[in-house]
Image (tube, rainbow, N blue to C red):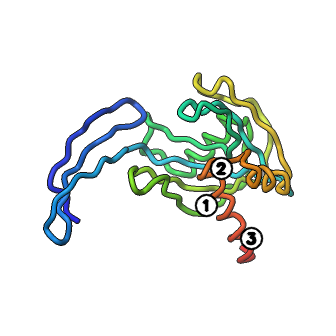
Amino acid sequence: MEQTSSREVYANPWMSVREDGVRRDDGSTGIYGVIDKPDYALVIPLDGDHVHLVEQFRYPLGLRRWEFPQGTAPDRADLEPGELAARELREETGLRAESMVDLGVLDVAPGMSSQRGRVFLATGLTEGAHEREHEEQDMRTAWFSRAEFEKMIAAGEVTDAQSIAAYGLLVLRERRGA
């Protein structure tokens, strides 16, 4: 598929939306609406058999949701993924990690968004003060056993696709014995 045109439809400091004209392999034409957002980092804070989650109100859903700490840095889009992960962990939970292991990459919604995320496993954790952004003022955090976390997924209490997929990357890594 070949891009034939592109125009920005909307933009704010966190995202932009563009409409691209395309030519398919058979010569037919069409359009794609694309949401561009900076890449994000997601962190799985793991201490023994417990994971640390954050809960916050997700405006588009109108619901409070539990998920792993994660985020972007629109003002620092060139930040290295490991640095972004450490920043998000500290900002949202106050935790600092002795070790951050890269578990892999996730695509948020590749049919409509260019955003990708890097997943990290954080261990050797020490607690400190969180440094939340203004939009995160309602955020809560808690430790859950892995069994509790898996029950929360099965019960629909954790529905964040990135958190569930990230946990899958962790389980696969553990099965490989890495």
Which residue is the site of mark 3?
174
Looking at the rendered structure, the kind of residue marked 3 is Glu
Callout count: 3
**What is the three-letter code of the residue carrying label 1?**
Asp
Q: Separation of disc 2 and disc 3 at Cα?
A: 16 Å
Q: What residue type is labelled 2?
A: Val
Q: In this view of the protein, which residue sits in the foreground, 138 or 47? A: 138
- Residue matched to label 1: 102
Q: Which of marks 3 and 1 is in front?
A: 3
The answer to whether the residue labelled 2 contacts the one labelled 1, judged by CB atoms less than 8 Å apart, is no
Which quadrant of the structure image shows residue 89? top right
First in residue order: circle 2 vs circle 3: 2
Side of 131 where 9 appears, left or right = left
Q: Mark 2 points at which residue?
A: 43
Q: 30 or 48: which is nearer to us?
A: 30
Q: Is mark 1 on a helix, strand or loop?
A: strand
